[in-house]
Amino acid sequence: MTGPAITIHAGFLPHTDPEASLAFYRDGLGFEVRLDVGQGTMRWLTVGPPGQPDVSIVLAPPAVDPGVTDDERRTITEMMAKGTYTAVLLASNDLDAAFDRLQASGAEVVQEPVDQPYGVRDCAFRDPAGTMVRIQQRP
């Protein structure tokens, strides 16, 4: 294929408590904090894995877009509380160590490491805003 190369720069996930999110992504996952903009609960936190400076996750207050209606905000809040609003899939070269680190940080465990029938070993956590965070290790 010819044409411009397109890469992933950042994805957005919601946060409801910036300090709890920092504890999860920085302390639990070991991500770097690249930007911290705003104040109080209206903070946009940019985090990413060391060694991948061009790939980031922006943790942002949910539904702050003025185009989102009050009904939509309620729906988003309900979905976040159930853990069905959004998800992220991460990878580790040592799943068990990653699991132990996150579990020791107090993160909510959804699934302990297990070999899946589709060929990966993975585990799952919920971040403080309810986002499903799956971590996998390929054989």
Image: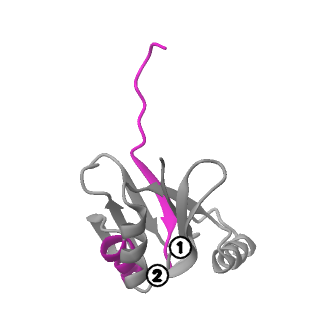
- Mark 1 neighbour class, 10 Å CA radius: few under 14, some 14 to 19, many 20 or more: many
121 left or right of 96 in image: right
- Percent from the top left, x then y, of residue 29? 36, 69
Mark 2 sits on what residue?
A: 107
Q: Is residue 137 magenta?
A: no
- Percent from the top left, x then y, of residue 86? 61, 63
Q: With respect to residue 69, does 94 lie above or below?
A: above
Tell me where residue 49 sits by quadrant: bottom left
For the residue labelled by badge 1, is the local secondary structure a helix, a strand or a loop? strand
Q: Earlier in the sequence, mark 1 or mark 2?
A: 2
Q: Which mark is drawn over residue 6?
A: none
Tell me where residue 129 sits by quadrant: bottom right
- Percent from the top left, x then y, of residue 70? 70, 75
Camera-nearest residue between 89 and 118: 118
- Percent from the top left, x then y, of residue 61? 49, 72
Camera-nearest residue between 117 and 6: 117
Pointers 1 and 2 in contact (C-beta within 8 Å): yes
The amino acid at mark 1 is: Phe
Could you tell me how far apart the alpha carbons at marks 1 and 2 are, in whole angstroms? 7 Å
Tell me where residue 126 sits by quadrant: bottom right
Mark 1 sits on what residue?
A: 125
Q: With respect to residue 52, does 21 lie above or below?
A: below
Q: Residue at x 67, y 72 (%)?
A: 76
